[in-house]
């Protein structure tokens, strides 16, 4: 199982738009993997968003992509209390973001992890708890619980 790490939790995103969210989260995830440049991550995420928004509805977006050079799958969580326009399928603002990055070498982890994130965030109780959490530790505990 892939775990969310505390240093990859953004309790309140500063970004006000889609572009800013992708950049802010890419910069945060480089703390867990400094070998990968934030610009490279943003480029991969932009390419993925060209195929359709990763805003899945209910205030949730799961930007994801594959970045060569990663030695493991990485997650980053970001929250916006005010909500951010992200071209979500339901046209509502997004409050909860989970960034997933993997490499081709970790392809076997990629889809199961994406599926697990999706299942977790479909639970309205979990979404509410993630919105109300006051610490990165609480978010990590909620996120890393068995589904």
Image (cartoon, grey):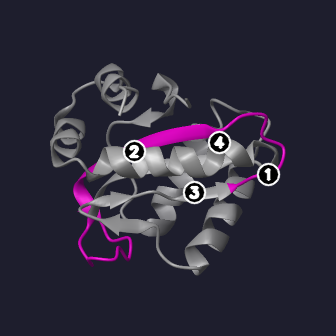
Whether residue 46 is visible = yes
Mark-to-mark CA distance, 2 and 3: 13 Å
The answer to which of marks 2 and 3 sits earlier in the sequence is 3
The answer to which of marks 1 and 2 sits earlier in the sequence is 2
Q: Quadrant of the N terminus?
A: top right
- In the displayed structure image, the side of residue 132 where residue 23 appears, left or right: right
Q: Which residues are magenta?
A: 66-93
Q: Any mark on residue 109, and which?
A: 4
Dot 2: within a 10 Å radius of its alpha carbon, few (fewer than 14), some, or many (20 or more) residues?
Answer: many
Q: Position of residue 122 (x, y in %)?
A: 27, 53
Whether residue 13 is visible = no
What residue sits right under mark 1 in the picture? Answer: 104
Mark-to-mark CA distance, 1 and 2: 25 Å
Q: Any mark on residue 145, and which?
A: none
What residue sits right under mark 2 in the picture? Answer: 78
Q: How many marks?
A: 4
Mark-to-mark CA distance, 1 and 3: 13 Å
Seen in the picture, residue 65 relative to 125 is either above or below; the reply is below
What residue sits right under mark 3 in the picture? Answer: 64
Identified at 16% across, 43% down, the residue is 128
The answer to which of marks 4 and 1 sits earlier in the sequence is 1
Front label number (4 vs 3): 4
Mark-to-mark CA distance, 4 and 3: 13 Å
Identified at 36% across, 62% down, the residue is 16
Front label number (1 vs 2): 1
Residue 58 lies in what quarter of the image?
bottom left
């Amino acid at each position: 199982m892939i775990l969310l790490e505390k240093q990859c939790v953004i309790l309140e995103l500063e970004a006000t738009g889609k572009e800013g969210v992708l950049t802010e989260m890419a910069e945060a995830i480089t703390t867990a993997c400094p070998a990968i440049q934030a610009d490279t991550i943003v480029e991969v995420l932009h390419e993925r968003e060209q195929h359709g928004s990763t805003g899945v509805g209910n205030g949730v977006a799961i930007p994801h992509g594959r970045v060569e050079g990663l030695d493991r799958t990485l997650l980053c969580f970001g929250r916006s209390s005010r909500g951010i326009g992200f071209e979500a399928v339901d046209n509502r603002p997004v409050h909860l973001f989970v960034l997933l990055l993997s490499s081709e070498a970790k392809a076997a982890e990629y889809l199961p992890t994406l599926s697990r994130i999706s299942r977790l965030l479909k639970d309205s109780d979990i979404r509410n708890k993630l919105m109300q959490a006051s610490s990165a530790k609480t978010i990590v505990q909620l996120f890393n619980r068995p589904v």
